[in-house]
Image: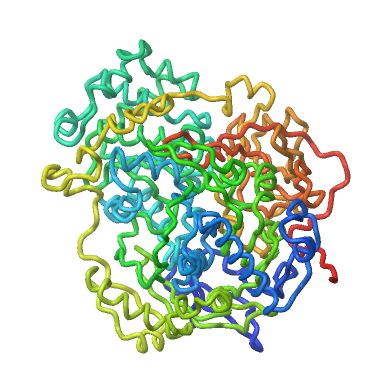
């Protein structure tokens, strides 16, 4: 028996019908330890045992919304919770229309394809007439809007990356902007069966590939001990890339034939790089004080890249920043100048080691998927603009060349995910979260989002239900058979939605008359023709369910990104406006965004070192993917909690910056700026460059005073400090990596960690 999670597949160990351990499957080359958090977590104090309604909402309805996050909950029966929820949905959609309902549910939730919470809630809301939806992701929002204009859709690129095995045969040099952190490659949406990235990075190193880590953090390429580390200033990658391009153009080291055949916009881009259009040449000497990389180092790297078969990859972390689109514009320009796009072992990467599937070489078939139905509501937001939407109904916002208006949201329905983890400026979010008339949440655990809801439904976890695990480019499909009985009174999201739909007269539309097993059979059989299109022949559902695991055959040919385009750009055009790589996008230029003029562009801002603001907050905080959990999932599990320092999330700081503040490893420190403050545990590390501190995302928000805006976060959630601003008007993406802070040693008594405890409960 197996089960699949976003961080791996496991063999469960059961004793007396209790889950006691998760053992890695035998085919996984580098299994993730995160799975070992699950057995203890599902029966912890954090588990939501029964439906619960905030006391003020139960007694006074929407008028009590200022009590969100502060008031106790009242546990109620299922019938009452479902009736109240159905009443609120019906009242709001009839009074304000379906566009007043926001179907949030951003988050990975279950790896199973049927119980995927986001698909469930969207299907449910579509049956009821639709909802305001979101576009893009926090992980890659800026890149998702930038790349289609200059090279192609990000999802298409992700599935088409040159395989690691091809890189091992042909690559001579790998330049990694943001490194290749294998901790990020623990995960994959839908499942990560074979964690091959550490193996392949090691194989490239064994074959003599030269690695260059362009990152403020040495550990971002820690798997290669002799990698060259260029400790760049955060947010200055675009300046660095422009200087590299200046060397290639001014020294005539670029591939003229490739530029002529496969690109447009060279004249406009080169005029900017050489300073002909603005009077400022983007030389290595210009970039050196902006990046903290010596001019000769930049110049040497450009020349070396021009002489070798080189892969240049950009981590998604770079675009989670103000002007996050620009490094990706620069990446396309730089790799186009080198002329190696479409060659084995060379070219461009936009996600190696960001997740497990990129470059895997596995079959891209994604497996079964639950149909969500048709959304009749056209209103949407870029995903990272939740708080702005709630605070500014009716106000305009720009996005990808068009001006839209924020809808007036009266009800938020969330199943899976945790906005109080992934959204920036939590204190602003709390203000926004108190604007809707009702907030309804499905959750396994008492996260901050659940504690800030009005109605909370306890949902089953992935080990308490039947499902199918399958992911694109992963190569496996697993039967996820129920391992243990649901804890407490938890129910499947599907059953919760079916019962609410029943009250609203839409059960048949939602369920189509199927129970869970009938759906699994239907979805599996429906996927078989799509599998054949990918060259796969799947057995019957009954055979699959009995066998429990299918491994797909490897494709015969090793994939090379844009190989056909390189060979014949007229016959195999890209999806850009011109059909070619665009060093300058006329379409983007036509939008009139001064911060985004259509080519890679240096546009300094205040939330970076060297700015006026940095005199007050002189440390740049980087908040990246944790190694001990997926985002905030299972922060309450053993694997994550064992890494805490006095219960706080660890933060790395350079020896020089620690000494200047009287800090040493295992100290507790207060990190602050004008947006908020938090406590962290200190790790002094020479793997972090001076002027930079690094903390993982995902520590559950734990306010010192419940519900109080601006109170101290006791636990170390970096989003009390990050700015809630869009990357630019092009993408409106997450800008969490643009955050300046200051640190001081904590001198007072340590407050108790309560993040993993349930909220207070009250009687009626």
Q: How many marks?
A: 0
Q: Who is closer to the viewer here, 655 or 706?
A: 706
- Residue 155: % across, % down: 35, 53
Residue at image location 35% in from the left, 71% down from the top: 367
| Among the 4 quarters of the image, the one containing residue 545 | bottom left
Q: Position of residue 297 (x, y in %)?
A: 41, 24
User: In the picture, which quadrant includes the C terminus?
Assistant: bottom right
Q: Is residue 168 visible?
A: no
Specify whether 607 is left or right of 319.
Answer: right
Instruction: Tell me what residue is drawn at x 26 percent, y 53 percent.
Output: 166
Q: Residue at x 34, y 40 (%)?
A: 312
Residue at x-position 77% and y-position 61%: 60
Give percent across and percent down for residue 374: 39, 64
Q: Is residue 618 visible?
A: yes
* Residue 627 locus on image (x, y percent): 57, 55
Quarter of the image where one finds residue 399: top left
């Amino acid at each position: 028996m197996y089960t699949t999670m976003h961080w791996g597949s496991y063999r469960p160990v059961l004793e007396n019908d209790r889950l006691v351990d998760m053992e890695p499957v035998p085919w996984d080359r580098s299994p993730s330890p995160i799975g070992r958090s699950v057995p203890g977590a599902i029966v912890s104090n954090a588990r939501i045992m029964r439906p619960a309604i905030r006391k003020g909402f139960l007694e006074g309805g929407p008028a009590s919304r200022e009590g969100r996050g502060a008031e106790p909950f009242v546990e109620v029966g299922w019938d009452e919770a479902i009736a109240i929820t159905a009443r609120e949905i019906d009242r709001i959609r009839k009074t304000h229309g379906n566009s007043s309902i926001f179907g949030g549910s951003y988050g990975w939730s279950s790896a199973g394809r049927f119980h995927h919470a986001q698909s469930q809630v969207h299907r449910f809301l579509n049956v009821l007439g639709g909802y305001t939806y979101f576009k893009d992701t926090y992980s890659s929002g800026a890149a998702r809007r930038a790349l289609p204009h200059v090279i192609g859709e990000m999802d298409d690129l992700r599935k088409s990356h040159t395989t690691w095995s091809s890189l091992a045969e042909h690559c001579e040099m790998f330049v990694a902007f943001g490194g290749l952190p294998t901790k990020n490659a623990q995960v994959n949406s839908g499942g990560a069966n074979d964690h091959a990235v550490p193996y392949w990075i090691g194989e490239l190193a064994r074959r003599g590939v030269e690695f260059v880590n362009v990152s403020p953090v040495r550990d971002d390429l820690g798997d290669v001990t002799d990698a060259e580390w260029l400790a760049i200033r955060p947010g200055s990658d675009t300046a660095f890339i422009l200087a590299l391009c200046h060397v290639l153009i001014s020294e005539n080291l670029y591939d003229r034939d490739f530029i002529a055949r496969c690109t447009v916009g060279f004249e406009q881009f080169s005029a900017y790089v050489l300073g002909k259009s603005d009077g400022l040449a983007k030389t290595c000497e210009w970039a050196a004080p902006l990046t903290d990389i010596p001019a000769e180092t930049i110049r040497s790297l450009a020349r070396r890249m021009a002489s070798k078969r080189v892969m240049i990859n950009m981590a998604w972390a770079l675009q989670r920043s103000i002007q996050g689109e620009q490094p990706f514009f620069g990446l396309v320009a730089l790799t186009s100048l080198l002329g190696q796009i479409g060659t084995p072992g060379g070219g461009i990467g936009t996600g190696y080691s960001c997740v497990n599937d990129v470059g895997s070489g596995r079959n891209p078939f994604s497996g079964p998927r639950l149909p969500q139905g048709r959304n009749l509501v056209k209103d949407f937001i870029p995903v990272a603009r939740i708080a702005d939407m709630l605070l500014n109904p009716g106000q305009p916002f720009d996005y990808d060349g068009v001006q839209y208006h924020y809808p007036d949201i009266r009800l938020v329905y969330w199943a899976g995910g945790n906005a109080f983890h992934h959204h920036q400026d939590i204190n602003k979010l709390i203000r926004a979260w108190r604007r809707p008339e009702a907030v309804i949440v499905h959750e396994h655990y008492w996260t901050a989002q659940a504690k800030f809801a009005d109605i909370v439904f306890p949902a089953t976890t992935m080990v308490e239900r039947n499902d199918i695990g399958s992911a694109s480019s992963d190569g496996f499909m697993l039967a996820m058979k129920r391992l243990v009985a649901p804890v407490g009174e938890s129910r499947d999201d599907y059953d919760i939605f079916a019962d609410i739909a029943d009250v609203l007269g839409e059960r048949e539309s939602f369920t189509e008359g199927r129970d869970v097993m009938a759906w699994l059979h239907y979805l599996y059989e429906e996927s078989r023709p799509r599998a054949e299109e990918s060259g796969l022949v799947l057995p019957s559902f009954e055979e699959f369910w009995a066998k429990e695991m299918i491994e797909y055959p490897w494709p015969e040919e090793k994939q090379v990104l844009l190989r056909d385009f390189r060979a014949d750009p007229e016959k195999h055009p890209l999806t850009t406006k011109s059909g070619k790589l665009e060093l300058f996008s006329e379409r983007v230029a036509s939008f009139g965004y001064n911060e985004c003029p259509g080519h890679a562009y240096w546009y300094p801002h205040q939330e970076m070192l060297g700015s006026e603001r940095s005199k007050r907050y002189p440390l740049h905080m980087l908040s990246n993917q944790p190694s001990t959990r997926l985002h905030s999932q299972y922060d309450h599990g053993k694997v994550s909690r064992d890494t805490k320092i006095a219960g706080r999330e660890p933060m790395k700081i350079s020896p020089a910056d620690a000494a200047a503040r009287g800090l040493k490893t295992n100290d507790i420190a207060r990190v602050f700026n004008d947006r908020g403050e938090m406590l962290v545990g200190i790790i002094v590390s020479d793997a972090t460059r001076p002027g930079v501190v690094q903390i993982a995302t995902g520590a559950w928000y734990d306010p010192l005073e419940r519900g109080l805006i601006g109170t101290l976060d006791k636990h170390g959630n970096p989003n009390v400090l990050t700015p809630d601003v869009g990357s630019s008007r092009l993408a409106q993406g997450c800008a969490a990596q643009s955050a300046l802070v200051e640190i001081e040693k904590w001198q007072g008594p340590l407050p108790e960690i309560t993040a993993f405890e349930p909220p207070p409960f009250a009687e009626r």
